[in-house]
Image: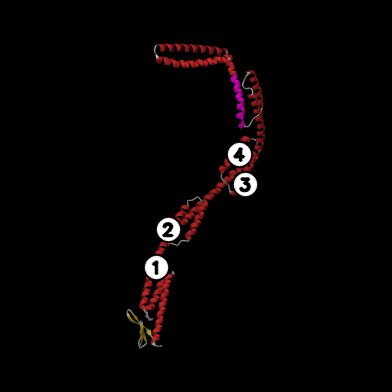
Amino acid sequence: MSSDPWGRVDETGTVYVRTADGEKVVGSWQAGSPEEALAYFERKYEGLVVEIGLLEKRVKTTDLSSKDALTAIEHLREQVDAHHAVGDLDALRIRLDKLVELVEKRREERKAQRARQSDEARKAKEALVAEAEELAQSEQWRVAGERLRSLVDTWKGLPRLDRKSDDELWHRFSHARSAFSKRRKQHFAQLDAQREQARQIKERLVAEAESLSDSTDWGPTAARYRELMAEWKAAGRAQREHEDDLWNRFRGAQDVFFGARSAVFAERDAEQAENLKLKEELAGEAEKLLPVTDLKAARAGFRSINERWEAIGHVPRDARPKVEGRMHAVERAIQEAEETEWRRTNPEALARAEGLTGQLQAAVDKLQGQIEQARSQGNTARADKLEKELQGRQALLDQALKGLQEFGG
């Protein structure tokens, strides 16, 4: 009989292994010595040790599924429980039990991780849906359309949820995209209709602009062109393939008219500039009549200058106030000289002036007498009141005397 710490072979060739529950029959060995029998079954034990070690490594370092790991553990456990090996089988069972615990722990961790990933995916998809529904109301057609396409790519990269939740969120997401596409299609259809209407309006405006291009009725035609331009802007844009051509025709017609008008105005401006030069010379000649020393000669001279003035045509509008103002100043100076002469030589006016002066002088003399009487009587208040009245009458008297002196010449 032969034995070692974990097994033995009896005299019949039966091989036993020692376990915590006592000896277990491993098998029968008849082909060789007991030592060879023990060595054979010890090698089988080492094989189990290697397989268990490999499985432990796979569980710890790879993404082996819990199901496959438990199947492999069960397969090894059956071999250990079959007692077809000599060695510390109880230690192998303990290792397998710990491996089961590790697999279960990993399964719970993966379950929790999947739950977290699912929750994150749900939140991410809900955020995508919320943004898509907001974009569905946007009128930034190009930017919103590009963003929605980007959201689809993002959606495809996210994990699937449970079927019900995933389908519900996808339905909302898809509905938002469809709503946006429908609104965008309606917008561009309406835009096409507006552009066609704008084309028709602009065709009419171009036709009228071209019909006016050879007009010489400068003011009304220029005003009508301004109205046509306002109508053009209000009409909006036509289709791109028509807009530039219509504008070139419209602008070309205006250029023909305004070019012709500019040529005419340039000739007129040159004539008016020459007229201004002549009128400035006449204004200078008129100013030499001042100051008026000989009223009759001044009137005759101004009349001659004014006749020549009226014979000259228009001057530039911005220069007109200044040059006409110079002539008006001379005219006013002559008129003032005439009024002064008339007042000086008018007998009736002289008589009225002399009468008024006499009345004022009498009033002043009377007030002075009343003031002296009041002061001699000690009535200071009455004297002060009469003094103020005297000042007013004296001012009127002074003014009347000055006028009388003007009559005296």
Q: Is 78 on the left or on the right of 219, as rendered?
A: left
Residue 64 appears in view: no
In the image, 189 versus 40, the foreground residue is 40
Say which of marks 1 and 4 sits in front: 1
The span from disc 4 to disc 3 (Cα, nearest Å) is 18 Å
Secondary structure beneath disc 1? helix
First of labels 4, 3 by sequence position: 4
Q: Amino acid at mark 4?
A: Tyr
Secondary structure beneath disc 2? helix
Q: Amino acid at mark 1?
A: Arg
Q: Amino acid at mark 3?
A: Asp
User: Tag on residue 123?
Assistant: 2
Q: Is residue 316 above or below residue 187?
A: above
User: Where, quadrant-wise, is the N terminus in this rendering?
Assistant: bottom left
The span from disc 4 to disc 2 (Cα, nearest Å) is 62 Å
The span from disc 2 to disc 3 (Cα, nearest Å) is 53 Å
Q: Is 273 on the left or on the right of 55, as rendered?
A: right
Are there few (<14), some (14-19), or many (20+) residues within 10 Å of tag 2?
few
First of labels 4, 2 by sequence position: 2
Q: Main secondary structure of the magenta part?
A: helix
First of labels 2, 1 by sequence position: 1
First of labels 1, 4 by sequence position: 1
Q: Quadrant of residue 78?
A: bottom left
Please state the extent of the stretch shown in magenta in the rendering: 317-337
User: Could you say where residue 333 lies in the image, as x and y percent from the top left?
Assistant: 60, 22
User: Tag on residue 245?
Assistant: 3
In the image, 320 versus 345, the foreground residue is 345
Q: Which residue is mark 4?
A: 225
Q: Which residue is mark 1?
A: 107
Q: Is residue 277 above or below residue 52?
A: above
